[in-house]
Structure formats: C-alpha cells, structure tokens
C-alpha cells in the first residue's frame, strides 16, 4: 500500500454514486493498478517465503504479511466498487464568477486569512491539501455563490464568515506558492 494510507472513518459508501474529477478518478485507477500489479505480488511472495520457514503460528513475518495482504485486498475491493459507481465530472466549469464543482476558489475569512481551495468529490480530498469535499460545510456554503458574496459557514471547529474573493476555472497555482491558512 502507499506510504500515506488513510483509513476511512465514515460509513462504506462504495455502492453510492458520487462525483469525482477526471484527475481524481485517474488517481484512484492508478492506485488500484499499483496495488494489483506491484504491491500485491510483492506481499504474496513475502507470504510464501515466510510460510516456507516453518511454524506459521509463531512466525511474525508470516502473520504481518498475511495481514498486509488482507488490507491490500480490502482496498482493492473498495476501489473496484467505487470506480464502478463514481460519476466523472469532466470539462472546465463555466467561467461566470460562480462557484461550481471542480473550481478553485479564493476565500477570505473573517480573521483576514486568504486560502484557495478546489472543490472536489469526497473520494479525492486526501490527494491535495488544498482540495475540499463538495460535501464539506465550506463547499456547501459556497457552491452556487459568486465572487464578492459573503457566506456564513457552520464548521465543526467553529462558525465563520467568509467572502468569495475570486473563482478560477483552472489551477491558479500550477506553479508557485500557496496562500496562508483559513
């Protein structure tokens, strides 16, 4: 598995359709291919090697490798289900100053901090720290709004007012620094 494996703390939504950007869908496909073609064969070989060493009940390497193989298989099963039901939102959002799925949005919070986020599907939020799920409180508050609008966001870490400074249909930071935190 990848070094930064993230455990899902929410219910299994593998059968529920959801939205995802084309880039996010490709990342999930690449993860599944990597697990199936590289990680799984490597761990399967480690299981076989450890099993050949004798008593499996006290063989830590065998137990660890079997557990890792089960985790890989569980993730592959999940990815397979998700990739079947996800709806790819492809193409460039309208450039009319409104916030749509897939847009980058520069927000100014009530404390004077600016932050740019991209609104993506919940299956791809871990890939980029500047992405937020379309299901998040911030995204739900700003979707459909336009540049200059102020929104009130009820967040788990506290309510806040935000102003939509700018809406971008393509990544404004393809090269360069990120904004300060919100």
Image (cartoon, rainbow, N blue to C red):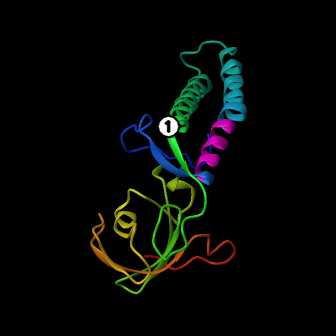
Specify whether 71 is left or right of 53.
Answer: left
The residue at the point 48 percent across, 49 percent down is: 19
Q: How many marks?
A: 1
Q: Which residue lies furthest to the bottom in this view?
A: 112
In-image side of 141 versus 71 (left or right): left
Q: Is mark 1 on a helix, strand or loop?
A: helix
Question: Disc 1 marks which residue?
Answer: 85
* Foreground of the two, 120 or 179: 120
Question: What are the residue bounds of the magenta stretch?
Answer: 24-34
Quadrant into which the C terminus falls: bottom left
Residue 26 inside the magenta-drawn segment: yes
Question: Where's residue 4, x and y in %?
Answer: 57, 49
Residue 12: quadrant of the picture: top left
Q: Position of residue 95 (x, y in %)?
A: 55, 73
In the rendered view, does 18 fall on the left or right side of 91?
left
> Which of the two residues, 147 or 55, is positioned nearer the viewer here?
147
- Is residue 182 magenta-colored? no
Instruction: Characterize the magenta stretch by its predominant secondary structure.
Output: helix
Residue 50 x/y as whole percent: 67, 20
Q: Residue at x 45, y 70 (%)?
A: 99
Q: Is residue 124 above or below residue 61?
A: below
Camera-nearest residue between 156 and 97? 97
Compared to residue 141, the image places residue 26 above or below, namely above
- Determine the image quadrant of residue 173: bottom right
Residue 56, percent from left and from top: 58, 15
* Point 54% across, 34% down: residue: 84
- Residue at 63% x, 48% y is 27
């Amino acid at each position: 598995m990848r070094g930064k494996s993230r455990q899902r703390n929410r219910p299994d939504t593998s059968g529920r359709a959801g939205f995802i950007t084309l880039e996010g869908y490709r990342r999930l496909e690449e993860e599944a291919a990597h697990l199936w073609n590289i990680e799984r064969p490597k761990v399967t070989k480690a299981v076989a090697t450890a099993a050949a060493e004798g008593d499996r009940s006290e063989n830590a390497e065998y137990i660890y490798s079997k557990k890792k193989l089960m985790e890989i298989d569980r993730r592959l099963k999940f990815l397979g289900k998700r990739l079947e039901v996800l709806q790819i939102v492809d193409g460039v959002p309208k450039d009319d100053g409104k916030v749509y799925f897939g847009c980058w949005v520069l927000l100014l919070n009530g404390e004077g901090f600016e932050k740019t986020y991209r609104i993506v599907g919940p299956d791809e939020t871990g890939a980029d720290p500047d992405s937020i799920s379309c299901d998040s409180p911030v995204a739900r508050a700003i979707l459909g709004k336009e540049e200059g609008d102020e929104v009130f966001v009820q967040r788990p870490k506290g309510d806040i007012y935000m102003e939509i400074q700018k809406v971008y249909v393509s990544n404004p930071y393809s090269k360069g620094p990120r904004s300060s935190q919100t």
